[in-house]
Amino acid sequence: MATVAKAPSQKAPEVRQTECFIGGRWTPSQSGKTFETLNPATEAVIAQVAEGDAADIDAAVKAARKAFEQGPWSKMDARDRGRLLYKLADLMEAELDELAALESLDNGKPIRDAKAADLPLAIDCLRYYAGYADKIHGQTIPVRGNYFTYTRREPVGVVGQIIPWNFPILMVAWKWGPALAAGCTIVMKPAEQTPLTCLRLARLAQKAGIPDGVINVVPGYGPTAGAALVKHPGVDKIAFTGSTEVGKIIMRDAAATMKRVTLELGGKSPNIVFDDCDLDAAVAGSHFGLYFNQGQCCCAGSRLFVQEKVHDKFVDKIVAMNKSRKLGDPLDMATEQGPQVDREQFDKIMGYIESGKKEGAGLLSGGNRFGDRGFYVEPTLFTGVSDDMTIAKEEIFGPVMSILKFKDLDEIAARANNTCYGLAAAIWTRDIQKAHTLAAKIRAGTVWINCYDVFDAAAPFGGFKMSGIGRELGEAALGSYTEHKTVTVSLG
Ligand code: NAP
Ligand code: MG
């Protein structure tokens, strides 16, 4: 059984921003309503946060529109926009410990992960796009006749950004970086479970000198604040990360005003371990690829296909890792696994564990709640999982690993692709021909070979099929925050 981590090594951080951030001002919601944000490790209320709805979204969109059309933003040199982004990244770096602690408190993720992954990746992402701000340009294009034709790449305008709770700070960076580099202005709705760090980052953006109205944050619920943002005629584009179910609602709601949409949605990613792999590397990478962030990753390797010959050894090693995994206070640097984000996610995961048992999978470790306070789930392992079981088909979004056996290369590509999703995949083998042949066959936006969850600001990320539309990160993301304008001049 997993062990409890020691006493907390870090004090809980102070909560300083809980109101809407609109046009550079902190304001309560117009309705006066608030909602609670909880510490998922203790189930205690951390703070009351302004509950924005349609009226607050409208005010925020007007502020963003004004900053886009009249404010200093549209008139600022691109290079200066870049400097402000670098400044924001520097301020985040200076407050890294505090931001990591606040993220850990509100989300439940181990502070060691927030410090080692979320914050450094977010800061790197902002710096990557800071460097792009003055390098977004059009082309001169030879056309028939006596004309001179060139293109301009202009910001798409006011963008609505809706983010989930699994990587709150990182999702802010993925969304603000390309939008600001392109010259857009922003209205963001953070997830209801984790509004605190997004609000803190809005304060840092103001401190960095990003002009008022360029970034607005309205905390609140999806069906009210989120839907109002998607339907608002003053918004030109929606960038969304979350469930496929809500992604469909967003596409439908955005259609009336023909908004551009980019959607980064769910997944059920195949992770394929061949018997000629480096076994220890495959075990460590697969364990990380599923249990990292309490399994709350859109790209989690949740269909783990292991080739017959190596199957039993692989399983033994995973069981051993689960036994020694440290669950406990997320603010303790020794903790490897914290609680799930809220009761709803906890209940959903426990429901999937029940379905795995009922449908005949073999439960080799975990399967229960951990402790009696907070939304902790033991690291859980099912073997003997078949392709048609519910746990092999639906996104669990929790620390539940499902191992499926396979025989050979011929069978595996079809089985890996037998899903409505196509976000990520991984392949573990020493045979480069096999690796690249399979990588080309898998219908997914990202394929990792002999690694898992390797992210870089420069490398595009997004889904095939029902895992989404468009790409985040890299040059690809900039494309979705700009419009191409063609200008043709008669030369007489
Ligand atoms: P979700 O409902 O898709 O939430 C994502 C964001 O969308 C949140 O900010 C949410 O607001 C907002 N939202 C909800 N309904 C909306 C609507 N009608 N219009 C506009 N915005 C709306 O995800 P969830 O309920 O938190 O999690 C459910 C499942 O989604 C998880 O179990 C997991 O399978 C998947 N998920 C995927 C990702 C990913 O990275 N792809 C991330 C999180 C969750 P609220 O805060 O009010 O919900
Ligand atoms: Mg919370």
Image: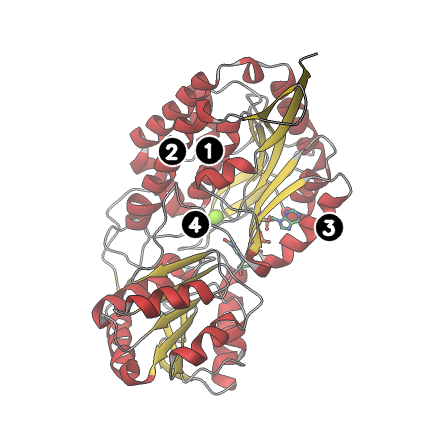
Q: Residues within 10 Å of mark 4 (few under 14, many from 20)?
A: many
Q: Quadrant of residue 419?
A: bottom right
Residue 177 circle label: 1
The amino acid type found where label 4 is placed reads Asn
Mark 1 and mark 2: span between their CA atoms?
A: 8 Å
Label located before the other in sequence (1 or 2) = 2
Mark 2 and mark 4: span between their CA atoms?
A: 26 Å
**In this rendering, the label closer to the viewer, 3 or 4:** 3
**In this rendering, the label closer to the viewer, 2 or 3:** 2
Q: Residues within 10 Å of mark 3 (few under 14, many from 20)?
A: few
The amino acid type found where label 2 is placed reads Tyr
Residue 252 circle label: 3
Q: Residue beneath label 2, please?
A: 128
Q: Does 450 appear above or below 202? A: below
Q: Position of residue 18 (x, y in %)?
A: 51, 34
Mark 3 and mark 4: span between their CA atoms?
A: 30 Å
> Mark 4: is the Cβ under 8 angstroms from ligand 2?
yes
Residue 107 circle label: 4
